[in-house]
Structures are given as structure tokens and as C-alpha cells.
Image: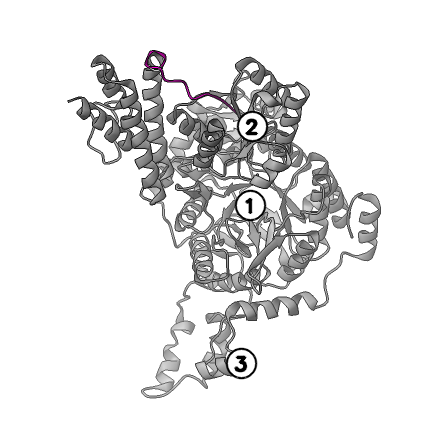
Amino acid sequence: MIRKGLAGGSYQPLTKESIAKVDQTVMRVVEEVGFEVNSEAALKLFEKAGARVDMEERRVRLPQAKVRELIGMAPPEVKLCGQEEKHDILLGGNRVYTGTGGTALYIYEPATKQTRSATLDDLKHIARLVNRLDNIHLFMLPTYPNELSIEQVDANRFFAGLDNTTKHIMGGVYTLDGVKQVLRMAEMVAGSAEKLRQRPLISMVACSISPLKLDTQYGDLVIEIARRGIPLVCPAEPLCGATSPITLAGNLVIQATDSLMGVMLAQIVKPGTPVIFGSVATNTDLRNLNYLAGSVEMGLLNAAGAQMAQFYRLPFYATGGMTDSKVLDAQSGYESAISNLLCALAGANFIHDAAGMMDFALTACYEKFVIDNEILGMVMRAVDGIKVNDDTLAFDLIKEVGPGGNFVAAKHTRRFMRREHYQPTLSDRNSREEWEAKGGRALWQNAGEKVRRLIADPRYHLPAEVRQNILSEITGIVD
Amino acid sequence: MDEDIISLIRENVIQGRIAQDDEGLDGGMVGEPGVTELIEKALAKRLDIRDIINKGLTEAMTLVGQKFEQKEYYIPDMLASAEAVGAAMKLLEPHLAQSGIKPKGKVLLVTVKGDLHDIGKNIVMILLRGAGYTVKDLGHDKEPQSIVNAVRVEKPQFLGLSALLTSTMVNMRDTIQALEESGLRDKVKVIIGGAPVSEEYARSIGADGYGSDGFQALAVIESLTST
């Protein structure tokens, strides 16, 4: 049984009053402090839309009413489609989905405890692996092909995704020309530009720079992607004590303001652009300013971010599920589990980075995708909660079995056992004797075996004709 | 009494208190004189400038460094102390020459072309000022040529280049090349820093040094000063 799109929301770190206070502070920041926009085109668009723009300082300030009007133009739900309809996702409300995230530069190999540079082949292999991991609902391009020049990166990353998995492909982008190539490629897969808008098989991410800054390149990317009507994520990455106030509440203000900057720009370019409010918020280690990917505060911040998104009626892109551990140890497991669980229970629509990432998000690991797939299965089971009705309370059955009886042979047990109880895909539940007899292996070894098996299975390919057309039209794709 | 003022300066640097309205690390110190007020007092009493610097400021920063090493202090604690020393040095500056103390040198800091990230550079700036260097901040996203022009005008002993992105670190190399082409390369020592760069990268582009963090940057500059 695959659990996805279930309603979260049972965990609420912010009260209604707290949400209102964060929102009021966000509005004050946008109106009184404003934000710096370094893209000339974006600056002009904000001015045309009625913002107060200081061209000298490149500073944009907007009155509250205008901010609310622009947020209101954004659709409350965004559909992200897979090449197979069973993978379609409808982000919005408090429905929960999970996916991979990016963008790691290295691959960790647990057998040798070494890392190496990630290649395009890694991306293809991970896409094939994730295509087979049911608790990962969306494929965000998780690694960077280090052997390619930056001009080749966008087209090759998206092609690797589209040609190896039928799940929706989301990815960060690097160059404007690359974005254009990727959009053309996706149109060819979808059938036409219109069909791609109807069924967006891909979506893109353009980050702001916290605090309160939009750089030239990403400003231009937001404009281009919005014009094409492709779903766009505008996440912000404020770090407590470094790029936001040290307090979690202060961090939430910066995260919301920075993400809304992108949301508003996209609506100015084209009202109704499918845009996703996003958070990569976390804290830093104030001994060395290292970005932290496995802290409990990251879980809190992204769970609270989900509440803010629900308040603004915007679909939400959260960050959770990573670890700062360098190996697949206990830290790796508990850090990934805690932030995934907090985000999911809060009803975060799309938890990105939910699988496969470690070491400050610099490194991806094949085995960890499989391990996190198991964590996510358990997390989604927790989101599912406890259903209470006559059937599940089972009075009649209790009466029938009576004192001293058992429920093993009851039809009721068979009817509910798979639905009510998560079926592990990796965890060891053998007795010690059985476990020893099977070689006494560690979890990562079993995960590795599963990786090898799933990657060796027959893979997905794009339809031959589409594939050929893409390879002949889009230059620079390494097949 | 004189010793008292100097030990108070030392204590307040450790607390990171620039002025009397600072609460200090331990809190509850608002209203007591901070480093700047104490320096004014020391100057009025004509205490030996060397004593103020060596026994007050430098000794305090050594202790702060130890606290950081021992994981008792975080970066913001370190910065507060360095800022207090920077403020003290500003007040002492006009008196250095007559005490026969040579200024420690001038450092130009800049984030290279294409890069808008300046937190790392700004931390280095505070630490260098806290160590007594004169620091000129050129800002971020600066073309190699504008950096070269600034080196020509400001005549610093050191140039610190910063970058956070793998896509912009290459502009460090271009900046060093531009210095060479303009004949200024041997007039200034170039130090680089930032998340994507390394000792190896520094060597490969012909920089004189690399600092893995603010304290390393300071250590590298100190070591290059003494050579």
C-alpha cells in the first residue's frame, strides 16, 4: 500500500495568534524595510505593478494590500504530473508528499567510507532507483554532474530524469539558455507547449538570497519560467544567526518574506502562475557557521513554514529528511527521521530532500535513498493516524473471540493487517538467531543489496521516437 | 589603579562590551563603563599605550581565542570582542605614532565579480580590525578591474578575495591575472577565502595564502606580515 497525499496538520508548532503575528511582521518588513532586487527586468516589473521602487538602492517596498492582492492571484493548488498518471501530485491544503532534493556534489560509498565526485551516470542510476521506491513520490534532481560544463548541466540533468523515471521531475536550474532547452525538451515529451502546461511533467526552482535579496540571475529565471507557465518553486534559505535573526520566529519572518518576493514577482509576470511557497530554513553551527541539515530546529522551522503556507493558501515546499552525519550511522537515521516526521505531521505539501542526502547536503548516497524510503513509509503511516469507526473498534469481533481467545485467524485481521500496519521494506525484524544465520548484516548492507537489485531491473526509457527527437534537436546531451 | 583600568579593559573585551549600554555576555552590565569609555579614561590618565594594547587588548583576545578553541565561545562572542578591540584601536590610533608604535598594515577586502555573498568577508573584516589592521571594504560583486584600481589608489599590503560559489571562484583567478597585467601583483599579498576554495586552489591561481575561516585568515596575514 502506497501512502501519499494524506492530510497532515496534527502537529502545529504555531498557535493561530503566532501565525497572525508572524504574518503582521512579514507585512511590516515588506512595507517598511523592503527587499533588494538586482534584476533590472524584475525591478521594472515591480515598479509597474505599483511597488515603491528606489532605483538607486534597487529597493522594492509594497503596501500590505498590494502584497495580499498578489498572493491572492497565486493558485492555492499546483498540479505536478508524472509521465504516468499514477504519479500525479496535487500540492495544496495540508496534503503531504515526499521527494528527493538537491543538489549534492559528491556520492558517499559506505563499503569504503569514501566520497567521490558525482557524475551524470549517478544521476541516471539514482533516477532509476527512486522510480522504484514507492514512498518517494517525486524526483527532484539530487546530484550535480561534475564532469559537464555549466552550459550542458541543465539539459543533461532533466534528460537524465525524464529518461529514467516516470515520476514528476523538479530541479534547480543554472543558466537561462539551459532553462530554454529544458522547457523545449519537456514540451517534446508532453506533446506540445499547451500539453505541458496542462500536464506539467517538470517544475523548476529559483532561490532568493536571504535576507531580503533577489540576485540578477534568479530574478531573470523567475521571469522566464513564469512566462512559460511552468510550476515554479521560490524557496528561501534563511539561517538562524547568520542570514536571519537567531530566533526561530525571526527566521520565519525572513523565510516568508523572501519566498513571497518570488511568489509576487511570478504573479506580476503572469497572474495565476503556478508557484510554490518554499522553505529551506535552518540554523547554523555558530562555532564555524556551517549550514546544518540535520538539526531539530530545521524540523520545527519547516513545520511552522507549512502552517504559514496554509495561512497564505499557497502550496508549500518544505525541507526535511537530511543528516549532517558523514556515514550511515545512528545520527544519520535519527536526524533524517525527526525532521521528516515533524514536516509531514504539520501537513507540509512537498517535503524535499526527504531522501538520500547527508553531510550538510553536499553528499548523496544510494543506500540512504533506500533507508530513507523506509523512514518515509513509517512517517506517512504516522500521518495516516488512527481511524476510529465501528469496523476498526471491532466490538462484534471482541464479543465473538471472547476472553482468552486470539485474533490471528480472524478474517478481520487479514482484512486490516496491511492497511493498519506499515509493512517494512528494509528494517530487520528477525530474531537474533535468524539474523545471525543470515550473516548478521548491518542495515546499510541490506540497503546496498536492494540498490543493486533495483538498478539492475529493466529500466524506463522515454518513447523511442521522442527520445530520438530530443537527442537530435537538443544539443549537448550525453546519452 | 592604572592596572585596574587595564584589567577592566581586558575583562570588557572578553565580555564583548564596546560601550556602557552593552549588556555583556553574562548580562546585567548595562551602565558600567565599556571598552571605549575605559580607553578614554586610560588616555586621560596618560597610561602607556603599549600597556593598553598588549596587556589590555591583545591579552584579552588571546583569552577569547582560547575560549573559542575550548568551545565555550561561539563566533558571535568572538565578533563582539573583536569589535570592542576595533573600537578601542580607533580611539588609540592618533596616539600610536608618538608612542613609536607602527600601524599593522592595510587590508583591502572584497567579494569577487558575480558573487553577492559577503557574510564571510565581513567576519574577516571585524577580526582583522580587532587585531589592529586598517581594513578597507570594497563590497561585493566587483569586477577585476575595479579591484585593481582600488589596489592602485589604496596601496594596501594585503588584498583579501572572497567567494561563496563554485561558479564565481574562477573570478579570483581573473582578478589576480588583472593585477599581474597592471604590474601591481608584487605590490600586494593576495589572500583568498570562501566555502568552495582551498589551499590547493589558492596555489593554483597564484594567491599568497588561504584562510579556511576568519581566524585562519588572520593567522595567515600575521604570518605574511612577519616575513
Q: Amino acid at mark 2?
A: Val
Instruction: Find residue A235 and report its horizontal and vertical position in percent.
Output: 53, 40
The amino acid type, in three-letter code, at marker 3 is Lys
Secondary structure, mark 2, is strand
Q: Which label's residue is closer to the chain start, 3 or 1?
A: 1
Asked if labels 1 and 3 touch by Cβ distance under 8 angstroms, the answer is: no
- Crowd tier of the residue under label 1, counting other residues whose Cα lies within 10 Å: few below 14, some 14–19, many 20 or above: some
Q: Chain of mark 2?
A: B
Q: Residue furthest left?
A: B1
Instruction: Report which residue position mark 2 lands on.
Output: B190
Q: Secondary structure at mark 1?
A: loop
Q: Is residue A273 visible?
A: no
Pinpoint residue B206: horizontal percent, then vertical percent.
Answer: 62, 32
Both marks 3 and 2 on one chain: no
Q: Does A257 sit left or right of B146 as displayed?
A: left
Give the residues drawn in magenta, as a range: B97-109
